[in-house]
Amino acid sequence: MNAHVKFPNTEQYQRAVGASKTVRWDIEADVIRGRTFDLSKKFLPDGLSMIDAFASLSPAEKRLVSQIQGRTYACIFGLVERFITAKLLEIGRDHWLGDQNALEALVRFSEEELKHQALFRRIEAMIGAKMPAGYVFDVDADQVAAAVLSKSTWSVLLLTLHIELFVQNHYRESIGPDESLSDLFKDVFLFHWKDECQHVVLDELELTRHDAALADQDRDRGVDDFIALVCAVDGILQAQANADAGYFTTICGRPIGTAERADLVAQLLKAYRWQYIFSGASHPRFQAVLTDLIDGEQFERIGNALSALC
C-alpha cells in the first residue's frame, strides 16, 4: 500500500468507528443478564423457520423445530464469523500506512466478530444445557474457514456482504417484531444486529475498494469462486438439515416414519436455503452492488447457479 494514497471514503470509515463506540456491549452484562432460554417459546420466527410448511407437526412439535433451527442459526453464525474475522485481519494490512480511520474501523470490526464467536459458543452451551442430548453440528470451523480463505478475496468479501445484509433483514423484519419468541434469543440477535449495521457498510466499502484494483479476468474468477462458496454453504446446509431432522426424530416423543422424516429433511433444507442463501441473494442492496460490479453474463451465471439449488 502506498503511504501517500488518500482514501475518498475516510468519513464513512470514521462514522463506522463512532457507531462502534456508541453501541459497544458486553455478552454477560448486556445480553445474557443472568437469564436462561425459555423452551415454552419459539426461537426463530415463522418467516425464517417456514414452520407452516411442516404440515404433519403439532403446535408443540413446530415450536421444537423452531428451537432446533434457532440452535443451528446460532451455530452457523459462529461458523461464518471465523473466516470473516480472518479476512478482515488480512485486508486490514492495506490500511497500515494509509487511512487510520479505515484501519481502526477494521480492527474494531475484527474485535466485534471475535466477540460474536464467543457469544455464539456461549449460546450453544446454554441451549445444550436445556435441550435433550443428541444435537449435532459436526462442522469444523477452522477447516471451513481455511477452505473459504483459499478462494479469491473478491469472492470472500462478496459472500461476507451477502451474509451481513441478510443478518440485518432477518432481525429487522422477522426476529425483532415477533413478541412470541424467547426474550433471550431475541436479545442475542438484537445485539448482534447492532454491530452488523456498521459491518455491512464496511463490507461494501472494502469490496468496492478491492474491486477497483482488479483486472477483468480476476473479477471473472471471483464470480466462479463466489459460486463455489455458495455451493459449499449449501453442502453444509444439506448435511445440517439431515442432522436436525434426525435430532427431532429422536427427541419428539413419537414414531416418525420414513416418508415423514424425508419431508422433514426437505422442509428444513428449504428453510435453511432461504435463511442463508436466498434471503441474502435477493436483498435489493446486494443486487444493486452486484450489478455495479459485474457484467450481464456474470450476473446470469450467478443467477443460474442459485436457481440450480431450488
Image (tube, rainbow, N blue to C red):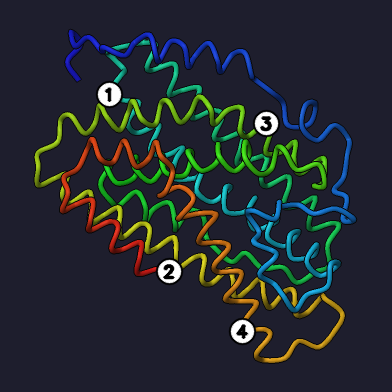
Pointer 2 and pointer 3: residues touching (CB < 8 Å)? no
Callout 1 secondary element: helix
Pointer 2 and pointer 4: residues touching (CB < 8 Å)? no
- Check disc 4 and give the amino acid type: Ala
Rendered view: 145 above or below 253: above
Disc 4 versus disc 1: nearer the observer: 4
Q: Residues within 10 Å of mark 3 (few under 14, many from 20)?
A: some
Q: CA distance from mark 4 to mark 1?
A: 49 Å
Mark 1 sits on what residue?
94
Rendered view: 20 above or below 183: above
- Check disc 2 and give the amino acid type: Cys
Mark 2 sits on what residue?
310
Disc 2 versus disc 1: nearer the observer: 2
Residue shown at the point (61%, 84%) measured from the top left: 262
Residue furthest to the bottom in view is 258
Residue 278 is drawn in which quadrant? bottom left
